[in-house]
Structure formats: structure tokens, C-alpha cells
Image (cartoon, rainbow, N blue to C red):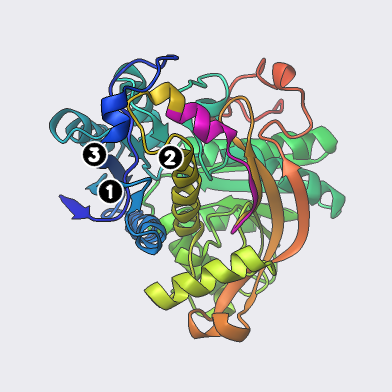
Amino acid sequence: MRIIRSTCAFAVSLGVLCMLLPTPSRSASNAPIKVALLAATSGSAAAAGHDMVAGWTLYWSEHGNAVAGHPIVTTVYDTNSNAGHALDQARRAVEQDGAQMIVGPYLANEGLAVAPYGIEHRIPMFFPTVSADDLSQRQANSFIIKVAGWTSSQTTHVAGEWAYEQGYRRVMTLANSYVFGYENAGGFAQTFTRRGGKIVNQIWAPLGTTDYTPYISQVQAANPDALFVEMVGADAVHFLQQWSQLGLKNKIPLIANETTTDQSNIRTLDPALVEGITSFGHFAEGRDAPATRSFIEKYGKAEGVLPSYMATSFYTAAQWIGQALETVHGDVSDPGMLLRAVRDIKLSDSPFGPMVLDQYGAPIDNVYIRRVVATTGEAAKYAKTWNVVIKTYPHVSQFWTWKPSDYLKQPVYSPTFQGYTK
């Protein structure tokens, strides 16, 4: 099912990516810009999908649902948290509804399914949450830009280094058995073992798992120094509940990825289940900076909750793309011109912090060590707990400390390649 909202749509025609000059008739018109927003508004990632739409809608409602005289028309297509359905919805958006660009979807496997179709049909694709490493590495393409986004292993490379520095030497990993989980765990494992640590075991849980007891029991039996965990959506909620219920919360330290303690998950949980958990991410809703505080207050007033990273990504993506559309005066007849304008945007301080794109279409931005604590001030109206910044690693590249040419010689992270020799 699709929902039509008069929020935003920026567009690109189905023409080739080239240096053609814009046509005077097109630039002179006030034609609407059509955006297909792919979001998981049902399925295991429905909470994330809602937040994506809410963030996008908030920005454009603040800006009159128009840019440079062109109405922004956004159609939301439900991917049902399913890669095959995401591809079907992309086809429908482009071939039946005339979408001029795609924003979203959410999950990494959805993005990998949609990307070849968008490239084939020369549709600009903006991925604020699809973080699949290879879409901005070995499979980088001019039609794919991770606007206001990230790369899966970008934050966990930092986490692996940090874990070793804390004195941990034997660590297990537990992650969802799909692309995002493999890449999060791989980023951690490679930097942790490179420093001299040992990965005791790696556990892969199917996406959509509700009973984590068998996996947690394996961790308990191995008794590692710490557990690195990646979970998304409802999986994160189930894991965090069961981790605490089985008595491991204060026994084995957790090193969580960004999504495990994302606001969309912890907002539904008893604070006792999550307070004190350390995680690594490119967004922290408790970051003490004007751009972040301003956004979370606006979002809180609009939605009654604090924003997730997904809501923040889509709000910031709308800002980023909106600036590019202003640069080209709303003319989307030449996708190459629009894509170049998007790549030239630099945000000196977004709700995430400073963000710029590298030559592969991936952001270079801050990575934060975060801790879940009780909310304070205005934020307490909208949530009981939030992620605050403990330490900032500025200007982190998707390649961490490697030269891109050296890093790209290795395979993408997968169940069979985790960056170390077992």
C-alpha cells in the first residue's frame, strides 16, 4: 500500500547522466518534483519506517513542501521489510507513477536489491539509512549516494579498536544473519583482531528472531570478556529484554552497534534494561550541540517522542537534497547536474555533526561512543532514556585508517570473511 503525502520530492528524469545543459522550458516551469520514498511501514522494521517518513515529512512541512518554486510530491511505498517487495515497489514507483528519484529503503538487503534497478533505469538513489558497505565501495556508482547516511562497518571499525584499548582480549559477536549484521560484526572483528584480540565465536541469528535464549546461552557458556552485538528493529527489543532477564546485563559487558540502542528500540523498554549500555554510532540524540538539540525538540513536539537515527537521517537528507535543488533552481531534467550538486554539499553541523561526502558517495562524519542514560531537560518530556556522547571520533572515513586502494583489495565482510583468520 502506498501513502501519498504532500511532503517532498526531488526529481531526476530518466535521461542519461551527462553534461547536457538544462532545457529552458523545464527550468521555467513549476512542475512538481516526484519522490519515491521506500520505507518499511510494516514488517519487522515498521518502527524504523514510520520514523523515516516522519523525519522527511517534518523537514518539508517546515519549508512549504516546495523548493525553488517546484512542489515536492512524495509517495511512500511500503517495502514490508522485505528485499523482494522493495524491488517491486521501486518498479511500481518508476514505471507506473513516474518517480524521478528514490529515497530509501531502510534495510541493507533492500538497498542491495533496489540499486541495480535504479542504475539500469538511471534513477538517482539516495540512501540515508541503507549502509551496505559495497554500495559505496566495490559497487560504487554515480547514481547511488548515501546522503546523510553511513557505511555499516564505519562505526564498528572504531568499536574494535576501542574494545582492545579497554583491556578486552576475548570477545564474542552476535549479529543478525544478513548483510548489515555481517558488515557490523566484520568491521569490529577486523580491527579488534588486528590489535591482538581474539574472537572466541561468532553467532548469526536470523532476522526476525523472537527467542534469543539459545544464542545468549552460548555466550554465557563461553564467558567472554565482552559481547559485541548488532540488532535491528524488533530483534533489538527482544534481545535486550532477554539479555537482562537471563541476568547477563551486569555480568558480561555489551559493546553494542548503533541500531541496538537506537531510540526507536529503547523508547519502548524499561530503563533498567538499557541504562549503562555502551554503543557506537554516527548519531546520538543526547549530543549536546545546538543542531542536535534544535532538531530533537522540533521532532519531539511533532511526534511526541525523541527521534531515532532513521528519522534524523531522512530529515537531514531532505535538508541536503533541498540545498542541492536550490543550487540547480529546481531543475531536475539532468540527473547528472543534480547528482553533482548533491555531492558538492557540505554540512558544517547537522543533527549528526559535520558531514561531507567522499569520492565514493559515502559520508565522512563523526563516530560517537554513546551511553544510554536517563533523559534530562526538555528531552524528558519525550523519552525516559537516550544515548549521550562519551567520546567523539571526528571525520571518520568508511575506510578507517586504511588507504582506500588497500582496503578495497579485501572482500566485503560476509559470513566467510570477517577480516581475520579463524
Residue on which the image places disc 1: 71
Distance (Cα) linking label 2 and label 3: 13 Å
Compared across the picture, whether 420 is left or right of 84 comes to: right
Q: Earlier in the sequence, mark 2 or mark 3?
A: 3
**Image spot of residue 32 (x, y percent):** 24, 42
| SS class, disc 1 | strand
**Image spot of residue 132 (x, y percent):** 50, 34
Residue on which the image places disc 3: 31
Residue 123 figure quarter: top left
Q: Residues within 10 Å of mark 2 (few under 14, many from 20)?
A: many
Q: Residues within 10 Å of mark 3 (few under 14, many from 20)?
A: some
Decide whether residue 377 is among the magenta residues.
no
Assign the C terminus to one quadrant of the image. top right
Camera-side residue: 253 or 128?
128
Compared across the picture, whether 154 is left or right of 165 comes to: left
**The disc labelled 2 sits on which kind of residue?**
Leu
Q: Which label belongs to residue 325?
A: 2
| SS class, disc 3 | loop
Decide whether residue 350 is among the magenta residues.
yes
Q: Looking at the image, which residue is at 60% across and 25% down?
A: 417
Specify start and end residues of the magenta stretch as a single range. Answer: 338-351
Marks 1 & 2, CB-CB < 8 Å contact: no
Instruction: Establish if 296 lies above or below 29.
Output: below
